[in-house]
Image (cartoon, helix red, strand yellow):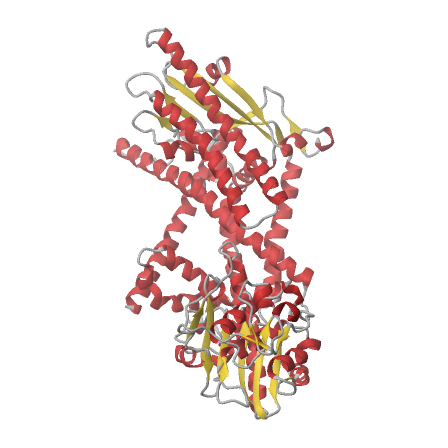
Amino acid sequence: WNITALTWFYCVLAFFVVFSIGVVYFEIMGCIVLIRRHPDFFNKQPSSLFSVFYKAFMVVQIQKLSGIKNHVFTAAYAKDMPSTEEFAREKDHERIKMHPYSRITTWRIFRPFFRVLGEDEQKRIYTIDDVREQTPLITAKTWRLEKMFCRNRNVRMVAIVGGPSAITSNQARSSFACTLLGNIMTLLLIAAFMVWLDASVTTILLLTALLVYLGFSTLRNSVEVFDTYRDVRKSRKKDDGEGDEAIYQVWETFRVSEATPLLCKAVFTAEVVLFFIVPAIALFMVGNYPIALLFLLVSIVNGTRHYVNCAAVLMELGSMDKLDEMYVRGGEDLEELKDEDFREKSRLSSIIGKISQGRRRDTWVAIFTTFIFLFFVIFLGAYALGSDDGNEVEPDLLEDFAYPGQDNIAYPTCRMNQGMAIPGSEDTSLSDYVMIAALAYVDPEFTDTWLGRWFGDGVAVDSSDLVTEFRESYDGPKSVVSFKLITFPAQADFAVVSVRGTNNGWDALADAQLWSAAFLMQLTRAFLPIGHIWTPILENLVDAMSILQTEQLQDVAFYQQTSAFVEWLKARGYKPHITGHSLGGGLAMITGAQTGIPAIGLSGPNAYISHKTFDPPVTKEALDTLTFNIVPDRDIVPMIDDLAQLYQRIKCRAPLNNPIDCHTSVRSLCEILYMCGTQGRPAPCWCATDYGYPEPESLVGRTFANACPASV
């Protein structure tokens, strides 16, 4: 099945590549023909290819940079689509919209960069639907409530109000009521969701005001159409069924200012430098040649599509008529050639309407823009915040209080043995490893205090000197990964490495580098019908994607340093274990599988799909036998990548409106202590005071209120 699925996938990929090449070819060829037949080239000899490309570039830049106004109105007529002149004479609910940018382009101070157009010079810019002559037609048969509510209101629409196909009064009223109630319900739903998330009143009011502002245009549009409909119905009733038969909702865009060639060329230069030259040089300078070459290829193809843009030229011309006989080259059977010409035009129309432009393209652009925005927010946050040394918190632990554990069946892994026991006992509580994982976030100056309160004085020690010695001797690429080494004097060769989880922007970037491909494959599998059947090949696809990851990126991966540290410890006679929370848990499991030591992750991302992408790769057998992950309910991080065979699911008792709290290491510690019992370890105050667990039982008669003043 693996071979069959991979063969199918690569065949589909090859078909997609060929299809994409065909789409780009027809787009560019259509643009070249349209430019050659553009009015600016009329009565001239055929232009050179360079002048054609220059004109196409200017069309795109002028469209992008010039100021525009939107002319919106409704009108009723008793015949076919009226002409622009007829629309100009009879219209209702007329408004002119201009965005702030368009108004700025008309200011006198910007005259060197924009030419303000007079009323008779203002050029109409057509939509792709106008070019393709596709105007939504609403009749009694085509009317659908959800279709009316979700339609694009920034395009033309024709509603039939007379004749056998006329929409009924109930349909018109339902459309208006649905728009009104739909917007109100959407507003209430979002506001209720914000209340559920415990957002502040100010945040809720600001968001509500923004939504009202954004939805006002839609509501006003529906009111205007419904008002025109009522007027037409009254008129037809008065005239015994005679009169206007259609309502036209018109949205026309006109250019009010035109960018000068100087501005077009300046912006083009800035775009090329910022979005092409600088990234390409940076990628080559860091030695990331695979991604650099891929970037060059994709940039050249997309840059050509962007600046030699058939859709932009058609939006200038307003029609595909200039493509008539585009493919007719003469011959005996002229009619057959004209049929071929029609098919080619139809194909180009579909490409432009469904690929180059349209809702599908807008949706993907929005998705990619969101991802890029989030990446830059994380990246800038990494620079702004940098790395930190940990939280400066004094331990709030009670030695004279305990949780007895629950009478019902506890977690099977409450106690661990077979090499996992902390020195001094035959087995150890799972909570010991959870506590050590949480200590990675504590300031080094407080770590020994925490260890003394948890294990007892002198039982465990933060051997920061060994960590410092390793870092000074480590000759590999440096990273900002943070880890501690906990040693136990009673057994000199026993040690636990504690790796810190995501705590700043650099950690978040490490998460993205290591697990983004696996997460993408999981999303794809989730959206595909019977997607689970593709699970066996996901690791191959992720491995193929990792080809773009150069040796330099591999070297600075966080797990490289943690694995090197474990090997350094083993060479010095230690028998280390490793644990960590969140990113630290994922790194711990990778390191454990690479170095052959036991690893316990708390809320860590997994490595089953991405196991081939690490250097050196890890085997599924190592993940199944050496790694263990603690998975709280509703915690999204351990859902990344697929789980290996050894894991323990635990409850998350956080409120339903606060799933992020399920990822908190100390909450997970409280859950394990409450269900399994403290087993000789102290009970934390915060389990009852901060996370809603019952108060622990006193062992000496002291009240919990006296022991933990925060509970009062």
Residue 117 seen anywhere in this rendered image of the structure: yes
Above or below — where is 119 with respect to 489?
A: above
Q: Position of residue 81 (x, y in %)?
A: 40, 19
330 lies left or right of 230: left
Image quarter of the N terminus: bottom left
- Looking at the image, which residue is at 31% across and 25% down? 140
Image quarter of the C terminus: bottom right
- The residue closer to the viewer here, 610 or 642, is 642
Q: Position of residue 674 (x, y in %)?
A: 50, 71
- Looking at the image, which residue is at 30% across and 21% down? 165
Q: Position of residue 141 (x, y in %)?
A: 29, 27
Residue lying farthest to the front in this orientation: 701
Residue 43 seen anywhere in this rendered image of the structure: no
- Looking at the image, which residue is at 40% across and 33% down? 323
- The residue closer to the viewer here, 272 or 363, is 363
- Tell me which corner region of the image, top left, top right, bottom left or bottom right, holds residue 280: bottom right
Q: Position of residue 514 (x, y in %)?
A: 51, 68
- Looking at the image, which residue is at 45% across and 87% down? 418
Above or below — where is 63 with respect to 11?
A: above
Residue lying farthest to the right in this orientation: 109
- The residue closer to the viewer here, 179 or 618, is 179
